[in-house]
Amino acid sequence: MKTIKSICCIGAGYVGGPTMSVIAQKNPNIKVTVVDLNQQRIADWNDQDLSKLPIFEPGLDQVVEEARGRNLFFSTQVDEAIDEADMIFISVNTPTKTYGKGVGMAADLKYVELCARQIARVATSDKIVVEKSTLPVRTAQAIKSILDHTGNGVKFQILSNPEFLAEGTAMTDLANPDRVLIGGEQTPEGKKAIEALVNIYGAWVPKTQILTTNLWSSELSKLVANAFLAQRVSSINAISELCEATEANVEEVAKAIGMDSRIGPKFLKASVGFGGSCFQKDILNLVYISKSLGLNEVADYWEQVIIMNNHQRNRFANNIVSNLYNTVSGKKIAFLGWAFKKDTNDTRESAAIYVADKLIDEQAQISVYDPKVSATQMQSDLNYLNTRTETENKTYLKTKTDPYKALESAHAIAVLTEWDEFKDYDWQRIYEAMIKPAFVFDGRNVLDQEQLKAIGFQVQSIGK
Ligand code: NAD
Ligand code: UGA
């Protein structure tokens, strides 16, 4: 089996950057080059000031500091890195299609196909091509078809190696993965390629946790893992509404069911709804695949997870309006948090964006504080929805870098992200600076409800 000396990863995003940093850290003898078309992103990865890395992930800066310049490189020279590499990871974005057949559901594979075509054009020696992006089942067939028709005699093996890291905990997830999944062709060459990738992970992951399967099981398992995780969130969120109507407490219910070892305690936190770039996209993809195969009941079953999530976000916004005497027009609603979860600067599909949009429809003034998200990012998230003009969005959505300023003179506070620092604020001071009655809508159940009530706040949580 050929020893892998050089790796190229196409896509320096939330997955490519951290994943390759850890592979380089744990395999100092392998040269790892992460390439991207986005020059600014690569410049940020190369910034000497580690606080300027394009992604905020606890612990990422230390790993980059250790490996960068030694055997980890970030570059825009895509062709060069492809040609030099023995193994190429494709880690580009696979968003939901916004046009044509499958619009709003199917995964848009144009970036993946462009990578395959670029590899086919540039490669002059045999390569192992690894799907790191999350892809519809059987995508490897399309990649193989492109790579097998170069006519220059170069041989390719395709592997599927989906990534299971969660943002905010990416570095610990990568260092101690529950499992690493590698799918490949069940031919002698395919098995050799699988072994080459097993050895790279084997530098730090126990072999018993490295699963090898056929290509299609691996591709499908990634979509299914995300669907099951999101389904748990939608399930507990459905129960949160039932709790609110019956005086049951969703945290008590979650604890009671989670102690059943068959159910387990994780991923049962009721919330304003799941966000992030992947859950919705991957379930829609699963629904689309099922529909395309004529499996309508399967499609309907999984689509319900998304329907429930949209309902939970809307319900949260509607609840704010109804509690504020059915009008928020001209009222200041302060948001604590904009990121889709704590410990990340990622805002893709964050519930905050949708709740803000709905409240702005009601002419509320939104004032946001998030410790890691910039004002420009928030405006661009809202503009992306295309609900109103950019100028209108600017007048309705203001961002503050000081939380106390964001909350001053507000009629209500809405907690949209569970950042730890929110718990330690001076809530007495916040209360005094607000319009009375002062409302708190805790979309993450992170604040001490009893303490806030004792101060004088009107508090609403999820499922309590
Ligand atoms: P991202 O948007 O952060 O990064 C993708 C990068 O690829 C971008 O920087 C883009 O400029 C670059 N790119 C696109 N086409 C290119 C090309 N032809 N050549 C060079 N660079 C190109 O996306 P991400 O969050 O890292 O996700 C990547 C994939 O991993 C997706 O399929 C996603 O579903 C999957 N995934 C994401 C996560 C996560 O937590 N974000 C976790 C597991 C899996
Ligand atoms: C998720 C999966 O957990 C990863 O395994 C997967 O690799 C990744 O998607 C992906 O494919 O992109 P991520 O979206 O980064 O990771 O973060 P999660 O921790 O899964 O949270 C997703 C959303 O669900 C967040 O908005 C979070 O606040 C919400 N959530 C999560 C809840 O509301 N309740 C919970 O109990 C758990």
Image (cartoon, helix red, strand yellow):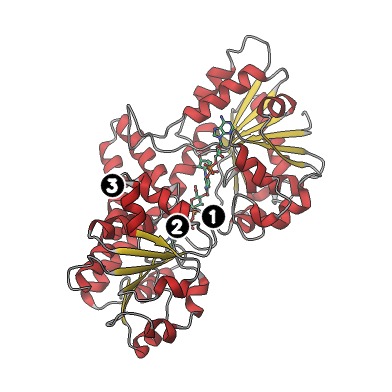
Question: Which amino acid, by three-letter code, is at mark 3?
Answer: Thr
Q: Do the residues labelled 1 and 3 touch (CB within 8 Å)?
A: no
Residue 9 place in picture, x, y as percent: 65, 36
- Give the vertical position of 368 relative to 206 (above or below): below
Q: Farthest residue in the top direction? A: 151
Tell me where residue 303 sits by quadrant: top left
Question: Which amino acid, by three-letter code, is at mark 2?
Answer: Phe
Q: Are marks 2 and 3 in contact (CB under 8 Å)?
A: no
Tell me, for residue 387, which label it has, or none. Answer: 3
Q: Nearer the viewer, residue 233 or 440?
A: 440
Tell me, for residue 340, which label it has, or none. Answer: 2
Residue 455 place in picture, x, y as percent: 37, 89
- Give the vertical position of 219 relative to 387 (above or below): above
> Which element is circle 3 on?
loop
Task: Tell me the quarter of the image containing the C terminus.
Answer: bottom left
Tell me where residue 38 sits by quadrant: top right
Q: Residues within 10 Å of mark 3 (few under 14, many from 20)?
A: some
The residue at the point 72 percent across, 26 percent down is 80
Residue 39 place in picture, x, y as percent: 62, 37
Is label 1 within 8 A of ligand 2 (CB to nearest ligand atom)? Answer: yes
Earlier residue among tags 2 and 3:
2
